[in-house]
Amino acid sequence: MTKTIDVQVNAQSIAAFKKGYPLILKDAVMNPEVLQEEGTLIRLVDKYRKFVAKGYFGHQNKGIGWVLTRDDNEEIDFAFFESKISSALARRESFFEDSETTAFRVFNGEGDGIGGLTIDYFDGYYMASWYSEGIYTLKHHVYGVLDKLVDYKAIYEKKRFDTKGQYIEQDDFVRGIPGDFPIIIKESGMNFAVDLNDGAMTGIFLDQRDVRKALRDKYSDGKHVLNTFSYTGAFSVSAALGGARETTSVDLAKRSLAKTIEQFSVNGIDYEAQNIKVMDVFDYFRYAKRHELKFDVVVLDPPSFARSKKYTFSTAKDYPALLEDAIAITEKNGIIIASTNNASFSMKKFKTFIDKGFADAGSRYKILEESSLPKDFRTNRDFPEFNYLKVVILQKLK
Ligand code: SAH
Protein backbone atom coordinates (compact mmCIF):
# COMPACT_ATOMS: atom_id res chain seq x y z
CA MET A 1 0.00 0.00 0.00
CA THR A 2 1.15 3.49 -0.79
CA LYS A 3 2.10 5.82 2.04
CA THR A 4 -0.30 8.25 3.70
CA ILE A 5 0.61 11.89 4.24
CA ASP A 6 -1.10 14.72 6.11
CA VAL A 7 -2.46 17.57 4.01
CA GLN A 8 -3.67 20.75 5.62
CA VAL A 9 -6.87 22.21 4.20
CA ASN A 10 -8.57 25.57 4.75
CA ALA A 11 -11.59 26.25 6.93
CA GLN A 12 -13.96 26.85 4.05
CA SER A 13 -13.23 23.47 2.50
CA ILE A 14 -13.53 21.75 5.88
CA ALA A 15 -17.10 23.04 6.20
CA ALA A 16 -17.84 21.56 2.77
CA PHE A 17 -16.18 18.20 3.54
CA LYS A 18 -18.22 17.94 6.71
CA LYS A 19 -21.38 18.25 4.63
CA GLY A 20 -20.11 15.43 2.42
CA TYR A 21 -18.56 17.38 -0.45
CA PRO A 22 -16.14 14.88 -2.02
CA LEU A 23 -13.87 16.87 -4.33
CA ILE A 24 -10.59 18.28 -2.96
CA LEU A 25 -10.18 21.56 -4.80
CA LYS A 26 -6.71 22.84 -5.57
CA ASP A 27 -7.34 26.02 -3.58
CA ALA A 28 -8.31 24.11 -0.44
CA VAL A 29 -4.78 22.86 0.22
CA MET A 30 -2.52 24.97 2.47
CA ASN A 31 0.67 22.95 2.08
CA PRO A 32 0.60 21.78 -1.56
CA GLU A 33 4.36 21.13 -1.55
CA VAL A 34 3.78 17.84 0.30
CA LEU A 35 1.79 16.50 -2.65
CA GLN A 36 4.31 14.81 -4.90
CA GLU A 37 3.25 11.39 -6.06
CA GLU A 38 -0.11 10.74 -7.73
CA GLY A 39 -1.94 8.01 -5.89
CA THR A 40 -0.60 8.99 -2.48
CA LEU A 41 -3.22 8.46 0.19
CA ILE A 42 -3.85 11.65 2.12
CA ARG A 43 -5.27 12.55 5.51
CA LEU A 44 -6.89 15.97 5.37
CA VAL A 45 -6.30 17.89 8.60
CA ASP A 46 -7.16 21.36 9.88
CA LYS A 47 -4.64 23.94 11.03
CA TYR A 48 -4.45 22.26 14.45
CA ARG A 49 -3.67 18.96 12.67
CA LYS A 50 -7.06 17.61 13.64
CA PHE A 51 -8.45 14.91 11.33
CA VAL A 52 -11.07 15.91 8.74
CA ALA A 53 -11.17 13.19 6.09
CA LYS A 54 -9.09 10.71 4.09
CA GLY A 55 -8.69 10.48 0.37
CA TYR A 56 -6.18 10.22 -2.45
CA PHE A 57 -4.06 12.62 -4.46
CA GLY A 58 -4.77 12.74 -8.21
CA HIS A 59 -5.15 15.70 -10.56
CA GLN A 60 -8.51 15.84 -12.29
CA ASN A 61 -9.82 19.10 -13.78
CA LYS A 62 -10.21 21.59 -10.94
CA GLY A 63 -9.51 19.05 -8.22
CA ILE A 64 -6.36 17.49 -6.81
CA GLY A 65 -8.09 14.42 -5.43
CA TRP A 66 -11.18 12.99 -3.81
CA VAL A 67 -12.34 12.32 -0.27
CA LEU A 68 -12.93 8.60 0.30
CA THR A 69 -13.94 8.47 3.96
CA ARG A 70 -14.56 10.73 6.93
CA ASP A 71 -13.69 7.97 9.37
CA ASP A 72 -10.04 8.08 10.51
CA ASN A 73 -10.19 4.38 11.37
CA GLU A 74 -11.30 3.25 7.92
CA GLU A 75 -8.36 1.94 5.88
CA ILE A 76 -8.23 2.58 2.14
CA ASP A 77 -7.45 -0.97 1.16
CA PHE A 78 -8.91 -3.89 -0.77
CA ALA A 79 -11.79 -4.20 1.72
CA PHE A 80 -12.66 -0.53 1.20
CA PHE A 81 -12.90 -0.95 -2.58
CA GLU A 82 -14.84 -4.17 -2.14
CA SER A 83 -17.41 -2.54 0.09
CA LYS A 84 -17.96 0.41 -2.30
CA ILE A 85 -18.15 -1.74 -5.41
CA SER A 86 -20.40 -4.37 -3.88
CA SER A 87 -22.85 -1.69 -2.69
CA ALA A 88 -22.81 -0.17 -6.18
CA LEU A 89 -23.54 -3.55 -7.77
CA ALA A 90 -26.39 -4.16 -5.33
CA ARG A 91 -27.94 -0.80 -6.23
CA ARG A 92 -28.02 -1.85 -9.91
CA GLU A 93 -29.77 -5.15 -9.27
CA SER A 94 -32.84 -4.13 -11.26
CA PHE A 95 -30.62 -3.24 -14.22
CA PHE A 96 -28.90 -6.65 -14.13
CA GLU A 97 -32.32 -8.29 -14.13
CA ASP A 98 -33.70 -6.31 -17.07
CA SER A 99 -33.26 -8.35 -20.25
CA GLU A 100 -34.31 -5.35 -22.41
CA THR A 101 -31.26 -3.32 -21.31
CA THR A 102 -27.85 -4.98 -21.15
CA ALA A 103 -25.59 -1.92 -20.90
CA PHE A 104 -25.47 0.51 -18.00
CA ARG A 105 -23.16 2.14 -15.48
CA VAL A 106 -22.35 0.00 -12.46
CA PHE A 107 -20.08 2.45 -10.66
CA ASN A 108 -20.35 6.22 -10.96
CA GLY A 109 -17.32 7.83 -9.34
CA GLU A 110 -18.02 10.02 -6.31
CA GLY A 111 -21.72 9.13 -6.54
CA ASP A 112 -20.75 5.61 -5.51
CA GLY A 113 -18.03 6.71 -3.12
CA ILE A 114 -14.84 6.77 -5.21
CA GLY A 115 -14.27 9.88 -7.31
CA GLY A 116 -12.23 9.46 -10.48
CA LEU A 117 -13.41 5.95 -11.33
CA THR A 118 -16.38 4.79 -13.35
CA ILE A 119 -17.27 1.25 -14.40
CA ASP A 120 -19.70 0.49 -17.21
CA TYR A 121 -21.29 -2.86 -17.98
CA PHE A 122 -21.81 -4.04 -21.55
CA ASP A 123 -23.46 -7.45 -21.67
CA GLY A 124 -20.90 -9.26 -19.53
CA TYR A 125 -17.96 -6.97 -20.30
CA TYR A 126 -16.82 -4.42 -17.71
CA MET A 127 -15.15 -1.18 -18.74
CA ALA A 128 -13.30 0.85 -16.10
CA SER A 129 -12.55 4.51 -16.86
CA TRP A 130 -9.75 6.17 -14.87
CA TYR A 131 -9.80 9.94 -14.58
CA SER A 132 -6.40 10.51 -12.94
CA GLU A 133 -3.05 8.85 -12.72
CA GLY A 134 -3.60 8.83 -8.96
CA ILE A 135 -6.66 6.61 -8.95
CA TYR A 136 -5.10 4.46 -11.67
CA THR A 137 -2.31 3.49 -9.26
CA LEU A 138 -5.05 1.82 -7.16
CA LYS A 139 -6.40 -0.24 -10.04
CA HIS A 140 -5.19 -3.58 -8.67
CA HIS A 141 -7.81 -3.27 -5.91
CA VAL A 142 -10.60 -2.60 -8.36
CA TYR A 143 -9.71 -5.42 -10.71
CA GLY A 144 -9.17 -7.74 -7.74
CA VAL A 145 -12.64 -6.86 -6.45
CA LEU A 146 -14.21 -7.53 -9.87
CA ASP A 147 -12.41 -10.90 -9.94
CA LYS A 148 -14.00 -11.69 -6.63
CA LEU A 149 -17.50 -10.29 -7.05
CA VAL A 150 -18.60 -10.64 -10.66
CA ASP A 151 -18.63 -13.19 -13.39
CA TYR A 152 -17.21 -11.18 -16.28
CA LYS A 153 -16.40 -12.09 -19.86
CA ALA A 154 -13.55 -9.57 -19.84
CA ILE A 155 -12.43 -6.28 -18.33
CA TYR A 156 -11.41 -3.31 -20.47
CA GLU A 157 -10.10 0.07 -19.34
CA LYS A 158 -9.93 3.67 -20.56
CA LYS A 159 -7.33 6.07 -19.27
CA ARG A 160 -9.01 9.47 -19.21
CA PHE A 161 -5.96 11.33 -17.94
CA ASP A 162 -2.92 12.73 -19.68
CA THR A 163 -0.67 9.74 -20.31
CA LYS A 164 2.00 12.01 -21.82
CA GLY A 165 2.07 10.10 -25.05
CA GLN A 166 3.00 6.86 -23.38
CA TYR A 167 -0.02 4.89 -24.51
CA ILE A 168 -0.79 6.17 -27.96
CA GLU A 169 -1.51 2.79 -29.46
CA GLN A 170 -2.87 1.44 -26.24
CA ASP A 171 -4.75 -1.80 -26.01
CA ASP A 172 -7.57 -1.38 -23.54
CA PHE A 173 -7.87 -5.07 -22.73
CA VAL A 174 -7.15 -5.91 -19.09
CA ARG A 175 -8.11 -9.52 -18.45
CA GLY A 176 -10.62 -12.26 -19.25
CA ILE A 177 -11.39 -13.54 -22.73
CA PRO A 178 -11.01 -10.76 -25.31
CA GLY A 179 -14.30 -9.75 -26.92
CA ASP A 180 -15.10 -10.11 -30.58
CA PHE A 181 -16.12 -6.51 -31.30
CA PRO A 182 -18.47 -5.05 -32.12
CA ILE A 183 -20.74 -6.75 -29.64
CA ILE A 184 -24.45 -5.97 -29.72
CA ILE A 185 -25.93 -4.65 -26.51
CA LYS A 186 -29.60 -3.99 -25.84
CA GLU A 187 -31.12 -0.81 -24.55
CA SER A 188 -34.86 -0.53 -23.96
CA GLY A 189 -35.17 -3.31 -26.54
CA MET A 190 -33.07 -1.50 -29.17
CA ASN A 191 -29.76 -2.88 -30.42
CA PHE A 192 -26.50 -0.99 -30.39
CA ALA A 193 -23.09 -2.06 -31.67
CA VAL A 194 -20.34 -1.39 -29.15
CA ASP A 195 -16.56 -1.64 -29.40
CA LEU A 196 -14.61 -1.42 -26.15
CA ASN A 197 -11.23 -1.51 -27.82
CA ASP A 198 -11.48 1.31 -30.33
CA GLY A 199 -10.19 4.51 -28.75
CA ALA A 200 -11.85 6.76 -26.22
CA MET A 201 -15.47 6.21 -27.24
CA THR A 202 -17.45 2.98 -27.37
CA GLY A 203 -20.19 3.78 -29.90
CA ILE A 204 -22.85 4.74 -27.40
CA PHE A 205 -23.23 7.25 -24.58
CA LEU A 206 -25.10 5.36 -21.90
CA ASP A 207 -26.17 8.50 -20.04
CA GLN A 208 -28.68 9.35 -22.82
CA ARG A 209 -30.64 6.10 -22.43
CA ASP A 210 -33.81 7.74 -21.09
CA VAL A 211 -33.74 10.42 -23.78
CA ARG A 212 -33.42 7.83 -26.56
CA LYS A 213 -36.40 6.00 -25.10
CA ALA A 214 -38.45 9.20 -24.85
CA LEU A 215 -37.59 10.09 -28.44
CA ARG A 216 -38.64 6.66 -29.66
CA ASP A 217 -41.80 6.35 -27.58
CA LYS A 218 -43.20 9.89 -27.67
CA TYR A 219 -41.76 12.15 -30.34
CA SER A 220 -40.90 10.22 -33.49
CA ASP A 221 -43.95 8.59 -35.00
CA GLY A 222 -44.48 9.91 -38.53
CA LYS A 223 -41.89 12.67 -38.05
CA HIS A 224 -38.80 13.87 -39.88
CA VAL A 225 -36.09 13.89 -37.22
CA LEU A 226 -32.83 15.82 -37.56
CA ASN A 227 -30.02 14.49 -35.37
CA THR A 228 -27.14 16.95 -35.17
CA PHE A 229 -23.70 15.98 -33.74
CA SER A 230 -25.03 12.50 -34.38
CA TYR A 231 -21.82 10.48 -33.69
CA THR A 232 -22.93 6.86 -34.36
CA GLY A 233 -26.54 7.91 -34.93
CA ALA A 234 -27.97 6.42 -31.75
CA PHE A 235 -30.75 9.05 -31.56
CA SER A 236 -31.55 8.43 -35.24
CA VAL A 237 -31.96 4.72 -34.54
CA SER A 238 -34.36 5.50 -31.68
CA ALA A 239 -36.33 7.82 -33.95
CA ALA A 240 -36.51 5.28 -36.78
CA LEU A 241 -37.65 2.56 -34.38
CA GLY A 242 -40.26 4.98 -33.06
CA GLY A 243 -41.77 5.24 -36.52
CA ALA A 244 -40.01 8.33 -37.89
CA ARG A 245 -40.91 8.99 -41.51
CA GLU A 246 -37.32 10.02 -42.17
CA THR A 247 -34.16 10.68 -40.18
CA THR A 248 -31.21 12.92 -41.02
CA SER A 249 -27.96 12.45 -39.10
CA VAL A 250 -25.22 15.06 -39.32
CA ASP A 251 -21.70 14.63 -38.00
CA LEU A 252 -18.39 15.95 -39.13
CA ALA A 253 -16.33 12.86 -38.34
CA LYS A 254 -15.73 10.66 -41.38
CA ARG A 255 -16.14 7.47 -39.40
CA SER A 256 -19.65 8.50 -38.35
CA LEU A 257 -20.96 7.30 -41.73
CA ALA A 258 -19.87 3.66 -41.33
CA LYS A 259 -20.79 3.68 -37.62
CA THR A 260 -24.26 5.04 -38.30
CA ILE A 261 -24.87 2.52 -41.07
CA GLU A 262 -23.84 -0.17 -38.60
CA GLN A 263 -26.25 1.05 -35.88
CA PHE A 264 -29.17 1.13 -38.32
CA SER A 265 -28.24 -2.28 -39.70
CA VAL A 266 -28.06 -4.07 -36.35
CA ASN A 267 -31.66 -2.91 -35.85
CA GLY A 268 -32.84 -4.18 -39.22
CA ILE A 269 -33.40 -0.63 -40.51
CA ASP A 270 -32.64 0.06 -44.17
CA TYR A 271 -29.95 2.74 -43.85
CA GLU A 272 -30.40 3.72 -47.48
CA ALA A 273 -33.82 5.08 -46.61
CA GLN A 274 -32.18 7.40 -44.05
CA ASN A 275 -30.03 10.50 -44.63
CA ILE A 276 -26.53 10.38 -43.23
CA LYS A 277 -24.46 13.51 -43.81
CA VAL A 278 -20.78 13.78 -43.02
CA MET A 279 -20.53 17.51 -42.67
CA ASP A 280 -20.19 20.41 -40.29
CA VAL A 281 -23.45 21.04 -38.45
CA PHE A 282 -23.08 24.78 -38.95
CA ASP A 283 -22.76 24.30 -42.71
CA TYR A 284 -25.73 21.96 -42.61
CA PHE A 285 -27.87 24.66 -40.95
CA ARG A 286 -27.07 27.01 -43.84
CA TYR A 287 -27.75 24.31 -46.39
CA ALA A 288 -31.10 23.52 -44.77
CA LYS A 289 -32.11 27.17 -44.70
CA ARG A 290 -31.13 27.66 -48.33
CA HIS A 291 -33.21 24.64 -49.34
CA GLU A 292 -36.02 25.62 -46.99
CA LEU A 293 -35.88 22.30 -45.17
CA LYS A 294 -37.92 22.06 -41.99
CA PHE A 295 -37.91 19.33 -39.38
CA ASP A 296 -40.52 18.11 -36.92
CA VAL A 297 -37.90 17.13 -34.35
CA VAL A 298 -34.32 18.40 -33.92
CA VAL A 299 -31.85 16.77 -31.54
CA LEU A 300 -29.07 19.05 -30.32
CA ASP A 301 -26.44 17.23 -28.30
CA PRO A 302 -23.12 18.90 -29.05
CA PRO A 303 -19.78 18.21 -27.38
CA SER A 304 -18.80 20.78 -24.73
CA PHE A 305 -16.12 22.11 -27.03
CA ALA A 306 -15.57 21.56 -30.71
CA ARG A 307 -13.12 22.95 -33.16
CA SER A 308 -13.48 22.31 -36.85
CA LYS A 309 -11.59 23.91 -39.73
CA LYS A 310 -14.05 26.78 -39.92
CA TYR A 311 -15.73 27.10 -36.55
CA THR A 312 -15.01 26.83 -32.87
CA PHE A 313 -17.89 26.10 -30.59
CA SER A 314 -18.22 26.09 -26.83
CA THR A 315 -21.54 25.19 -25.21
CA ALA A 316 -20.93 27.67 -22.39
CA LYS A 317 -20.73 30.52 -24.92
CA ASP A 318 -22.45 29.49 -28.11
CA TYR A 319 -25.49 27.42 -27.11
CA PRO A 320 -27.99 30.27 -27.69
CA ALA A 321 -26.67 30.76 -31.24
CA LEU A 322 -26.77 27.02 -31.90
CA LEU A 323 -30.36 26.92 -30.73
CA GLU A 324 -31.25 29.92 -32.85
CA ASP A 325 -29.99 28.02 -35.91
CA ALA A 326 -32.02 24.98 -34.91
CA ILE A 327 -35.19 27.02 -34.29
CA ALA A 328 -34.99 28.43 -37.81
CA ILE A 329 -35.37 24.97 -39.34
CA THR A 330 -37.88 23.53 -36.87
CA GLU A 331 -41.56 23.40 -37.86
CA LYS A 332 -44.08 25.34 -35.81
CA ASN A 333 -45.14 23.05 -32.95
CA GLY A 334 -42.03 21.02 -33.64
CA ILE A 335 -39.85 19.55 -30.91
CA ILE A 336 -36.28 20.42 -29.99
CA ILE A 337 -34.31 18.15 -27.71
CA ALA A 338 -31.69 20.46 -26.24
CA SER A 339 -28.94 18.66 -24.39
CA THR A 340 -25.53 19.41 -22.95
CA ASN A 341 -22.99 17.46 -20.95
CA ASN A 342 -21.04 20.55 -19.92
CA ALA A 343 -20.49 20.34 -16.15
CA SER A 344 -19.38 23.95 -15.84
CA PHE A 345 -22.89 25.41 -15.72
CA SER A 346 -26.18 24.49 -14.05
CA MET A 347 -29.63 23.61 -15.40
CA LYS A 348 -30.72 27.10 -14.40
CA LYS A 349 -28.01 28.64 -16.53
CA PHE A 350 -28.80 26.25 -19.39
CA LYS A 351 -32.40 27.47 -19.35
CA THR A 352 -31.19 31.06 -19.71
CA PHE A 353 -29.36 29.94 -22.87
CA ILE A 354 -32.62 28.46 -24.15
CA ASP A 355 -34.47 31.69 -23.37
CA LYS A 356 -31.86 33.71 -25.19
CA GLY A 357 -31.86 31.42 -28.24
CA PHE A 358 -35.63 31.77 -28.60
CA ALA A 359 -35.63 35.52 -27.92
CA ASP A 360 -32.94 36.06 -30.55
CA ALA A 361 -34.90 33.96 -33.02
CA GLY A 362 -38.08 35.94 -32.28
CA SER A 363 -39.76 32.68 -31.34
CA ARG A 364 -41.50 31.18 -28.32
CA TYR A 365 -41.49 27.76 -26.71
CA LYS A 366 -42.82 25.63 -23.93
CA ILE A 367 -40.91 23.03 -21.96
CA LEU A 368 -42.37 19.53 -22.19
CA GLU A 369 -39.79 17.61 -20.18
CA GLU A 370 -36.48 18.10 -18.48
CA SER A 371 -34.05 15.55 -17.19
CA SER A 372 -30.54 14.92 -16.03
CA LEU A 373 -28.47 11.78 -15.46
CA PRO A 374 -30.31 8.43 -15.31
CA LYS A 375 -30.47 6.41 -12.12
CA ASP A 376 -27.43 4.23 -12.78
CA PHE A 377 -25.30 7.39 -13.07
CA ARG A 378 -25.69 7.87 -9.34
CA THR A 379 -25.03 11.36 -7.99
CA ASN A 380 -25.44 13.03 -4.64
CA ARG A 381 -28.47 15.33 -4.67
CA ASP A 382 -26.71 17.80 -2.37
CA PHE A 383 -24.05 18.48 -5.00
CA PRO A 384 -25.73 19.01 -8.38
CA GLU A 385 -22.45 20.08 -9.98
CA PHE A 386 -21.60 16.39 -10.49
CA ASN A 387 -24.88 15.78 -12.32
CA TYR A 388 -23.44 17.17 -15.56
CA LEU A 389 -26.18 16.14 -18.00
CA LYS A 390 -28.93 18.63 -18.75
CA VAL A 391 -31.70 17.79 -21.21
CA VAL A 392 -34.70 19.97 -22.01
CA ILE A 393 -37.34 18.74 -24.44
CA LEU A 394 -39.29 21.70 -25.71
CA GLN A 395 -41.89 22.62 -28.25
CA LYS A 396 -41.55 25.59 -30.58
CA LEU A 397 -44.78 27.56 -30.38
CA LYS A 398 -44.25 30.14 -33.08
N1 SAH B 1 -25.21 13.10 -29.70
C1 SAH B 1 -24.31 11.97 -29.82
C2 SAH B 1 -22.98 12.20 -29.17
C3 SAH B 1 -22.25 13.40 -29.70
S1 SAH B 1 -20.54 13.24 -29.47
C4 SAH B 1 -24.96 10.71 -29.20
O1 SAH B 1 -25.88 10.84 -28.42
O2 SAH B 1 -24.52 9.61 -29.52
C5 SAH B 1 -20.03 14.65 -30.32
C6 SAH B 1 -20.00 14.48 -31.83
O3 SAH B 1 -19.98 15.79 -32.39
C7 SAH B 1 -18.77 13.77 -32.35
O4 SAH B 1 -19.17 12.64 -33.09
C8 SAH B 1 -18.09 14.82 -33.24
O5 SAH B 1 -17.55 14.26 -34.44
C9 SAH B 1 -19.24 15.74 -33.59
N2 SAH B 1 -18.90 17.11 -33.94
C10 SAH B 1 -18.11 17.97 -33.28
N3 SAH B 1 -18.12 19.18 -33.90
C11 SAH B 1 -18.96 19.08 -34.95
C12 SAH B 1 -19.39 19.99 -35.96
N4 SAH B 1 -18.97 21.24 -35.99
N5 SAH B 1 -20.27 19.54 -36.89
C13 SAH B 1 -20.70 18.25 -36.86
N6 SAH B 1 -20.32 17.36 -35.92
C14 SAH B 1 -19.46 17.76 -34.98
Image (cartoon, grey):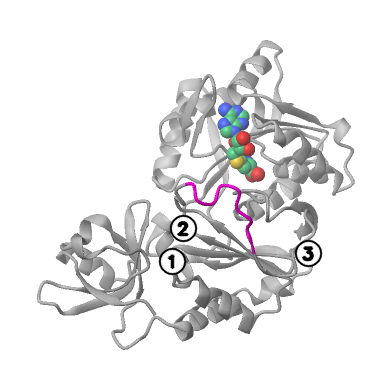
| Residue 324 point in image, percent of width and height | 52, 24
At 54% from the left and 33% from the top, the residue drawn is 365
Q: Is residue 332 left or right of residue 348?
A: right
- Amino acid bearing label 1: Ile
The question of residue 196 being in magenta is answered with: no
| Residue 152 point in image, percent of width and height | 70, 74
Residue extent of the magenta highlight: 165-173
Can you identify the residue that label 3 sits on? Answer: 100
In the rendered view of the protein, which quadrant contains the C terminus?
top right
Can you identify the residue that label 1 sits on? Answer: 135
Spatial CA distance of label 1 from label 2 is 7 Å
In the rendered view of the protein, which quadrant contains the N terminus?
bottom left
Q: Specify whether residue 300 is in view.
A: no
Q: Main secondary structure of the magenta part?
A: loop
Report if the CB atoms under discs 1 and 2 are less than 8 Å apart: yes
| Residue 175 point in image, percent of width and height | 66, 70
| Residue 12 point in image, percent of width and height | 18, 63
Q: Is residue 63 left or right of residue 28?
A: right
Local secondary structure at mark 3: loop
Can you identify the residue that label 2 sits on? Answer: 131
Q: Residue furthest left?
A: 48
